[in-house]
Image (cartoon, rainbow, N blue to C red):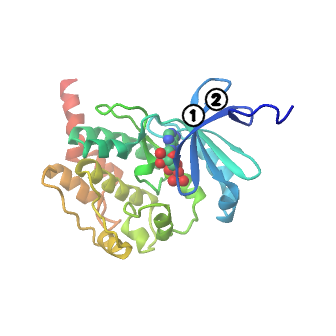
Amino acid sequence: KPGCEPRATKVLFGRYELGRLLGCGAFAKVYHARNLSTGQSVAIKVISKPRVMRSGLASNLRREILALRRLRHPHVVRLHEVLASRTRIFFVMDLARGGELFSLVSRCHRLPEPVARLLFHQLISALSFCHSRGVFHRDLKPENLLLADDSTTQPFLKISDFGLSACLAPSTPNPLLSTICGTPAYVAPEVLSRNPYSGAAVDLWSCGVILFVLTAGFLPFNDPNLMNLYRKIRRGEVRFPRWASPDLRRLISRLLDTNPQTRITLDGVLTDPWFRIDLDEQKLTA
Ligand code: ADP
Ligand code: MG
C-alpha cells in the first residue's frame, strides 16, 4: 500500500525515528532522533557522501571511524554507529540536550571564572584523554562545544566532532576552509602560515581562544576584514578585559603563544596556578 498513507515520520534503516533539525554545519545537518529498539534519544549527523568522497579520504574513513567509536570519555560526544546509504553518511551519536556552550555564554554575557574553570577542566580532561590516544580535534570552536543539559551553574561539556574534522576535511591545512565553515577566529597562527603543525599545539591554541571567550564574553581576535583578522592572530596580541584575574591572564597568554614550540602543553596546563585553584582547595577540604 505505498502512497496510501502520508508518512508522518521518517525512519532510518528501520532503526531510528528522525525528529527535528538540531543544527546545520558547513558539511552536515544534525537531527534529533530516537532509537526505536531502546527508546534512547540520539543525534544523527547527516553528511552527503559525494563531498566526503571528493576529499579523497574515503578509504581512511572506515579505519578512523573505528578508532573514534572506541573513544569513550564523559566529555566527548560518543559515536554510537555509522550508517551509510548510497548518497549519505549518518553518524549516530550522543544527544547533547543543552545545545551549544556559546549560547550559554551569550545568555550570561560572560561566565564567572569558577564556572569557566569548571568547563575548562572538562575540556582539558577530554583533550588529555584523546591526545593520549593519538586523536586530535583540530577544529575546536564554539559549534563543537555542546552541553549535556540546561544547567547554568553546573554545566557539563560535551565535545563533538572529535577526530572527525581530520578524516572528513582535506589533509592539507586550508585556512580558507575554516572561513567557508564559519570563523577562522579559533585557528592557530601556524595553521594560517601553512607551517607544519602539531595537532596537540593547535588544539591548545584553540583552548586559549575558548577560555578567553568564556571569561571575557567576546573574541580575543576579531576583525570584519579577514586579512586583518589573520594579522591579529599571527601577532597574537590580546587585550584583556579589566575583570580578568592575573592568573587567568597568564594562562591565556601561555595558551595563545604564537610560537607552537614554546606554547604551553597539556602537562603545563595541569600544573598552572589558575587551573589548580579549585583542585587544590578540594584537596585541602577532602
Ligand atoms: P559541522 O561539523 O558540519 O560544522 P556540527 O557537527 O558542528 O556540523 O553540527 C552542527 C550543529 O548541530 C551544531 O552546531 C549543534 O548546534 C548541533 N549538534 C551537533 N551535534 C550535536 C549533538 N550531538 N547533540 C545536539 N546537537 C548537536
Ligand atoms: Mg562541527
Return the residue at label 2: 35
State the residue at coordinates (22%, 23%). 286
Relative depth, front residue between 162 and 183: 183
Q: Is 45 left or right of 113, judged from the image as shown? A: right
Distance (Cα) linking label 2 and label 1: 7 Å
Residue 236: which numbered mark, if any?
none
Q: Residues within 10 Å of mark 1 (few under 14, many from 20)?
A: many
Q: Residues within 10 Å of mark 2 (few under 14, many from 20)?
A: some
Question: Could you tell me residue 61's position as x and y percent?
Answer: 66, 54
Q: Is 71 drawn above or below residue 34 in the view shown? A: below
Question: Could you tell me residue 208's position as x and y percent?
Answer: 31, 55
- Quadrant containing the N terminus is top right
Q: Label 1's element?
A: strand
Relative depth, front residue between 86 and 130: 86
Q: Label 2's element?
A: strand
Type of amino acid at the residue the image marks with label 2: Asn
Relative depth, front residue between 229 and 261: 229
Q: Is 137 left or right of 45, judged from the image as shown? A: left
Label 2 vs 1, first from the N-terminus: 2
State the residue at coordinates (71%, 31%). 15
Relative depth, front residue between 154 and 117: 154
* The residue carrying mark 1 has its beta carbon less than 8 Å from ligand 1: yes
State the residue at coordinates (41%, 64%). 184
Residue 161 visible in the current orientation: no
Q: Is 129 left or right of 247, judged from the image as shown? A: right
Q: Are marks 2 and 1 in contact (CB under 8 Å)?
A: yes
Residue 195 visible in the current orientation: yes
State the residue at coordinates (44%, 73%). 195
Question: Could you tell me residue 241's position as x and y percent?
Answer: 17, 55
Type of amino acid at the residue the image marks with label 1: Val
Return the residue at label 1: 42
